Image (cartoon, rainbow, N blue to C red):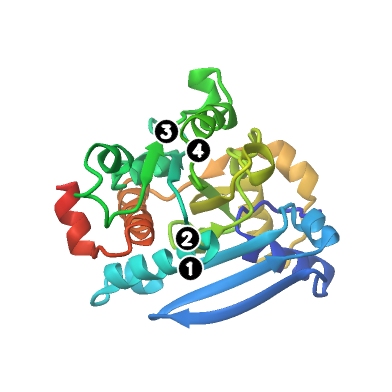
Amino acid sequence: MLSRRSDLAMEAKRIWNEDNLAELEGAEESVESRQGFEVTTVTITGDRASEELCKPKGKYVTVELGRFLRREDDSFEAGVQVIAEILQDLLGRVSGGVLVAGLGNPAITPDAVGHLVVKNTLVTRHLKRQMPDAFSGFGDLAALEPGVMGTTGVESVDVVGAVVREIKPTALIAVDALASRGMDRVCRTVQIADSGIVPGSGVGNARAALSKDTLGIPVIALGVPTVVDAATLTLDVAREAGVELDAGQLREKSGGMIVTPREIDSNVQTISRLMAYGINLALHPGLTVRDVDMFLG
């Protein structure tokens, strides 16, 4: 099992490799460039790999946002297109509606990713039913914010499950904030996976999973790391300095503390918009970024 916490499969695999000085069988990694963005795909196929990495079997695609963060020409449009293509690949052929679930707590900035993505999502389910001819060229997209158990008293999976049973979408896209191993990937990467998601797992407050097993439909997880577990960060900094610390003791002393950048407000706003537009172009393939700007007004 991993001594350091990360929601990113690529980081979890590299942590295991470092700790064990070996490659983990059943977890394959490949790296490619798409429109100037580095894209890493980790595919977990083995039971042992799934257990060791604390990740369900599936495909995890991580997009490094360096080009976008450097504000290179057309980097927003290119980043949106890359995310849209990955979503389309993981969703496969969508024959019906898709539900977007924005997880997390909008009152807490690092956890507001799901709320902000829903805010920038072009929902069309109601319009396609009211004016089918006018919106025939659009995808069938609905959105939901289930809230967090601490404020609603209801598990996210129960809220989402009730809506899934009512409107019967073909697939679910669950959006949430994640935890990274180190600050160098916080608000600098986006992970897209076909394995579902466990809300709150990144900050040690795991709830029931949203997955095909619990909901009966494919679940695509889309997230950005906004925090670092303090114990994990300390372990890595100490190791770089040549000092080995006791992970269990350090985690106990840290009291579950997490760390986030001081620019988190603007970072979360900017990257949530990037992810939302990726969803929009994936589910409404005839649209451009400029079209989405116009419709969202």
Task: Count residues near mark 2 (Cα–Cα under 10 Å), then give few for <14, some for 14-19, many for 20+.
Answer: many
Q: Which residue is located at x 47 percent, y 57 percent?
A: 94
Q: Is residue 203 above or below residue 8?
A: above
Q: Which residue is mark 2?
A: 190
Identity of the amino acid at label 3? Glu
Q: Which residue is mark 1?
A: 63
| Residue visible at 63% across and 78% down in the picture | 30
Mark 2 vs mark 3: which is more N-terminal?
A: 3
Identify the residue at image location x=27%, y=71%: 71
Residue topped by disc 4 = 168
Q: CA distance from mark 1 to mark 4?
A: 30 Å
Q: Are marks 2 and 3 in contact (CB under 8 Å)?
A: no
Q: Nearer the viewer, mark 1 or mark 4?
A: 4
Of the two numbered discs 3 and 1 in the rendering, the one whose residue sits closer to the viewer: 3
Measured Cα–Cα span from mark 2 to mark 3: 20 Å
Residue type, numbered disc 4: Lys
Task: Left or right? Give the position of 203 relative to 23.
Answer: left
Say if mark 3 contacts mark 1, CB within 8 Å.
no
- Nearest to the observer: residue 131 or residue 294: 131
Q: Secondary structure at mark 1?
A: strand
Q: Are marks 1 and 2 in contact (CB under 8 Å)?
A: yes
Give the alpha-carbon distance from disc 2 to disc 4, as whole Å. 28 Å
Front residue of 214/19: it is: 214
In percent of width and height, residue 294 lies at 14, 54
